[in-house]
Amino acid sequence: MAVAVEEALATAPTALLVEAATGVGKTFAYLVPILQSRRRALISTGTKTLQDQLFDRDLPVVCEALSYRPKAALLKGRANYLCHYRLELAAAEAGGAIGGGVKRDRLEVIEALQRFARTSQSGDLGQAGILAEDSVLWPQVTSTVDNCLAGECPNYNDCFVVQARKRAQEAEVVVVNHHLLLADMALKEEGFGELLPEVDAVIVDEAHQLPDIAGSFFGVAFGTRALRELARDARREQQQHAPEMLDIPQRMAELEACVAELLETSRTWEGRSSWDAVNPDRELDPLLDRMDANLGFVGDALEVAAARAPGLEQLRGRSALLLERLREWREETPDTVAWAERFSQSLILHRTPLDAARPLAQRRAARPAAWVFTSATLAVGDDFGHAARRLGLPADVASERLDSPFDFPNQACLVHPQPPLPNPNAPGYTRACIAWAWPLLRDNPGGGFFLFTSHRALQEAAAILRAELPPERELLVQGEQPRGDLLARFRESGNAWLLGAHSFWEGVDIRGEALSVVIIDRLPFAAPNDPVLQARASALEAEGRSPFMEFTLPQAVLALKQGAGRLIRDAEDAGILALCDPRLTGKSYGRRFLASLPPFYRTREPATALRFLEQARGRDVCA
């Protein structure tokens, strides 16, 4: 892999696709040629966790081995950095409201953040250990593109975001994540200047995630949370700098009334719904017209007050930007799909391009460099065609597929039912999965993951297993605790069962006996009622192509490879992969899934799989 990356660097501008299975050491494989070449490089990872791991652990190891230490920088999105100005506002608000019932522990957290702000070099809240990522305080003490005061901010010279970007501009190696890479691409086209430096090489690690993330960045989103934050901030600024301008809170109240009506109307919607499905007769158009008008009135009121303070001027710009987004979302542009995403307390209206490949290709062409896309899951069998199409790469793009160096026939066992279980859509399917897998659930000496393709099946399984698992076997369920806490408890337990949905199928690295078994209930086909996938399928059908063969099936194969990849993480690991879905052998396409998995030892009996695990771990075989 290092040789392939070295050749790509030498022939830039070019592109390279590399599937590197677990154990190949792909991070080292691209870091070594980059550092040896002395070229400026941008490395983008799938998550902030992987970003930190790469910058804090992998990069220093390779630098030490090569006796070369380039100037390196870690750059995250602005929402990760504490904002001095907004922290001061939050402190003033909390301090003034203590007598009104605000809990004192909130003020104590703000005081801890103030101490962190005085001592931290980076301002990275993820490293502070003070706030949970879902804390209501997080967005109040960080900035967004919408609410940043930029050069008008009184704390501009001390701004952690400005300092981080300055370090990135001066660095030879910059580590970012996909969200920031794509945000930079999108902002650059809109003329706001680029956040990231010009580089000779761009490495996209966990590249399989890029097309879906790109869909959101190259689309439009308009959310109720941004409207409520606008109203909250406008009241605060008006009370402080323009107390006599009572039309501002009045206009905000009218806007909030529109938001409340939209949220009430959407209360019964599915989590993700096509806009045409929830607004078939355009009955919501008058409400959106009122929201449009009210945002305009808000902007007019703030225009009058803008000269009073930088915060009011910034709010005027925010209201104008929100109005622009609403109008852009309502514009029926070709090759896009409008849809709504409902959360417990908010709603986001999206307009997403049907295919991110074209904008990805355009933006890659605008940044001539050696582009290396790598992941453990890019190929379906030996075919990179699906990944190349989604990433906007030519069909003949250079590619390498590197198998894992691990000894899968002797380290891992694949087991699936014989006779097959009932159809996955049949009533009682989840209970049937548990009944078949019960020897694995009960007798595995270590811990395991039970992965599901739907939260409904996950909750059903949790209810069954709570009643049937022995008390000494801890049951951890996604959604009941933060993801990080669940993983920490799972590691510490050593024999727990963790029930997880999508977020646990990838990005989890647990070695040893704590994760000895991975059970997967269904082949991970995307939900058929997903509005974006439905629109993409319709577009492919209109072109006379097969949505299932060209999109749905390859995506499911890659997702299964990700889930299976949780099992064997190093040369000392041993484990069992249990696939419950009868379609694995009952449908012709099942062979595509099996052919894409490593060469596991295979059996149809859980008891045989357990004996294999005992032998692989070097224990005496149980009678």
Image (cartoon, rainbow, N blue to C red):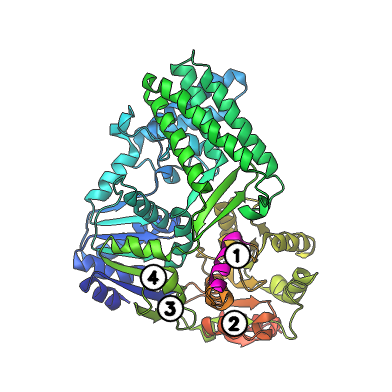
Res. 618 visible in picture: no
- Is the Cβ of the residue at disc 1 closer than 8 Å to that at disc 3? no
541 inside magenta stretch: yes
Asked if 570 appears above or below 74 in the picture, the reply is: below
The structure residue drawn at horizontal position 64% and vertical position 72%, both measured from the top left corner, is: 519
Please tell me the numbered disc located at residue 413: 2
Residue 123 x/y as whole percent:
37, 40
- Dot 2 or dot 4: first in sequence order is 4
Q: What amino acid type is highlighted by mark number 2?
A: Cys
Who's the residue at 41% across and 33% down the image? Answer: 317
Quarter occupied by residue 500: bottom right
Q: What residue lies at 32% left-to-right and 50% top-to-bottom?
A: 188
Question: Mark 1 packing: few (<14 Cα in 10 Å), some, or many (20+)?
Answer: some
Region of the chain picked out in magenta, as a range: 530-542
The CA span between labels 2 and 3 is 27 Å
Closest to the observer, 459 or 234: 234
Can you say which quadrant of the picture contains the N terminus?
Answer: bottom left
- Element type at mark 3: loop
Q: Mark 3 touching mark 4, by CB under 8 A?
A: no
Mark 2 and mark 4 in contact? Answer it, CB < 8 Å. no
On screen, residue 352 above or below 562: above
Q: Position of residue 178 (x, y in %)?
A: 41, 57
